[in-house]
Amino acid sequence: MNRKLDLNLLRVLCALVENKNVTETGIRLGMGVSSVSYALNKLRDHYSDPIMIRTKNGMQPTGLALDLYNHFSPALNLIEPASTGRKLPLHDKSFFRIRANPTIENWLASKLMNDDGTVIQNAVFEFNNFSNDGEARIEALRRKQIDIDIGTSLAVDSSIIQYQLILKNVHVACQVNHPRLHGKVTLEMLKKEKFIAYVLPKDSSDIELEKYIFYFDGITSLSRKVRVSSLATMLMLVSHSDAVCFMPASLVDYYSKFYNIKTLETDVGNEQTFVIYANILKSAKDNPIIKNIISHLMTLAE
């Protein structure tokens, strides 16, 4: 093993461990793919270790790579700002990976794409559902594979902050020319309709459970032939049939622009709330781009 190692190779090592992708590492560090691949080969030769192993789930770091990351990443964050006058891209990066379900992904991606503020002007955002398993989600945050996790609550973890977002009230969505539904919708009216249920994504531990987004007196009396975990799928079905569904009131204005639907107030479950959580590492709480994303999400709860 050679004793000397270029500082830039350590930067590439840390970025590869965080990104698990050569292309994304290049974007974060301002390098070409070939340069990142060359650096990875240099690291492999230097340490006589594969460093990153390609699997069906992407590139995964070896045990040695993780040990090196834990050793060098904090040091790089201290050394490089002092010598270059800027923060290390690995910790003040412009590439952000967001885990979210399709409903929030659609809405938030639009918000970020149309946000012309200087804070996120040069930022790149990638959305990925990643995993519904709670332990896997926590581990992804810890290892910085995900920068912000939006979904259900996670187990208490000292390294993670949870922001609670309460979406209040629901509306009934139906086709614009629905032959029966007009004005305020009652439970008796809904009993006569095909109702598409919105369910929470499941993991392997609760696959047999019914986890509906909204619960209220009388829900079991509704015909729920189709159950989906994507609001986009649900609204597509509603806009092309006589089926109906519920949707959070705070998302009505946004989604009504894209589907042939109308939304009606209802006295069914009007006290219902839909709670989601935005989970981030405590170490990222002061990052201006993370704060910007959180501020967008908070508008859903207003």
Image (cartoon, helix red, strand yellow):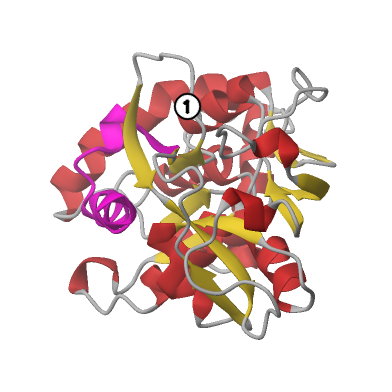
From the viewer's perspective, tell me whether residue 222 is left or right of residue 251.
Answer: right
Q: Is residue 79 left or right of residue 129?
A: left
Quarter residue 173 falls in = bottom right
For badge 1, the amino acid type reads Ser
Residue plotted at (55% across, 61% down): 172
Judge from the rendering whether residue 211 lies leftward or rightward of residue 256; answer left or right. right
Please determine whether, in this image, residue 209 is positioned above or below residue 123: above
Q: Position of residue 114 (x, y in %)?
A: 36, 79
Q: Tell me if 83 is positioned left or right of 66 in this view.
A: left
Name the foreground residue: 209 vs 27.
209
Residue at x 63%, y 44% (from the top left corner): 20
Residue 26 drawn in magenta: no
Q: Can residue 301 be seen from the camera position used here?
A: yes
Asked if one can make out residue 38 in the rendered structure from this viewpoint, the answer is: no
Q: Residues within 10 Å of mark 1 (few under 14, many from 20)?
A: some
Residues drawn in magenta:
275-302
Q: Badge 1 is on which residue?
A: 153
Quarter occupied by residue 216: top right
Say above or below: 157 vs 216: above
Q: Main secondary structure of the magenta part?
A: helix
Q: Of all residues shown, which one is farthest toward the front? A: 188
Write down the quadrant of residue 202 in the picture: top right
